[in-house]
Image (cartoon, rainbow, N blue to C red):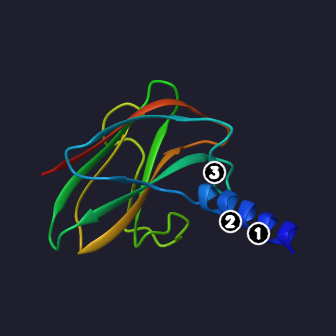
């Protein structure tokens, strides 16, 4: 019985770390890396997941920049980065291969992916969330 409980506890730690998201607020800047240990979408592209809490009608600009991969952003409602219903996506609006989403959000939590556009791409990136 003790081994089963330990195994279930270990599994829950692994499962929770695999679905962990980083909270971010307007005014914050994150330096990150996409690599082989990150989650992947069905197309094979890697991503990191972030959660943004917004007040009703809050307008934000989310910018993802990288000189090492083609940046792609996708934002959804709620806290599930795997939600297939995107409220907004962008590939190149920040110039070159950098991504930027400008939008007014509804109240509550919103998840977004700092994503490589192509399968297998990775490297360092900078993510910035600003109020507009």
Q: What crowding class fits label 1: few (fewer than 14 Cα within 10 Å), some (14-19), or many (20 or more)?
A: few
Give me the disc on residue 115.
none
**SS at mark 2 in the image:** helix
Measure how far apart labels 1 and 2 are at the Cα level: 6 Å
The residue positioned 42% from the left and 46% from the top of the image is 91
Mark 3 or mark 2, which has the lower sequence index? 2
The residue positioned 51% from the left and 46% from the top of the image is 115
Mark 3 or mark 1, which has the lower sequence index? 1
In the displayed image of the protein, which residue is found farthest to the front? 2
Identify the residue position indicated by label 2 in the image. Answer: 12
The residue positioned 38% from the left and 30% from the top of the image is 96
Q: Are marks 3 and 2 in contact (CB under 8 Å)?
A: no
Query: Which part of the image, by quadrant, shows the N terminus?
Result: bottom right
* The image quarter in which residue 105 lies: bottom left
**SS at mark 1 in the image:** helix
**SS at mark 3 in the image:** strand
Identify the residue position indicated by label 3 in the image. Answer: 39
Q: Are marks 1 and 2 in contact (CB under 8 Å)?
A: yes
Task: Indicate left or right for 114 with 103 as reference.
Answer: right
Task: Indicate left or right for 32 with 7 as reference.
Answer: left
Q: Horizontal and vertical percent for residue 36? A: 68, 38
The residue positioned 66% from the left and 59% from the top of the image is 13
Q: Nearer the viewer, residue 32 or 2?
A: 2
Identify the residue position indicated by label 1 in the image. Answer: 8
Task: Indicate left or right for 85 with 19 as reference.
Answer: left
Measure how far apart labels 3 and 1 are at the Cα level: 22 Å
Q: Nearer the viewer, residue 84 or 82?
A: 82
Q: Nearer the viewer, residue 31 or 122?
A: 31
């Amino acid at each position: 019985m003790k081994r089963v409980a330990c195994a279930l506890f270990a599994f829950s730690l692994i499962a929770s770390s695999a679905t962990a998201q980083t909270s971010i607020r307007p005014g914050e800047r994150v330096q990150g890396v996409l690599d082989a240990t990150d989650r992947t979408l069905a197309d094979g592209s890697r991503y990191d997941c972030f959660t943004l809490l917004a007040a009703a009608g809050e307008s934000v600009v989310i910018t993802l920049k990288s000189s090492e991969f083609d940046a792609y952003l996708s934002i959804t409602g709620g806290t599930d980065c795997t939600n297939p219903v995107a409220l907004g996506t962008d590939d190149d609006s920040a110039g070159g291969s950098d991504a930027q989403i400008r939008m007014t959000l509804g109240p509550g939590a919103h998840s977004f992916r700092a994503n490589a556009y192509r399968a297998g791409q990775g490297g360092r990136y900078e993510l910035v969330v600003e109020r507009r």
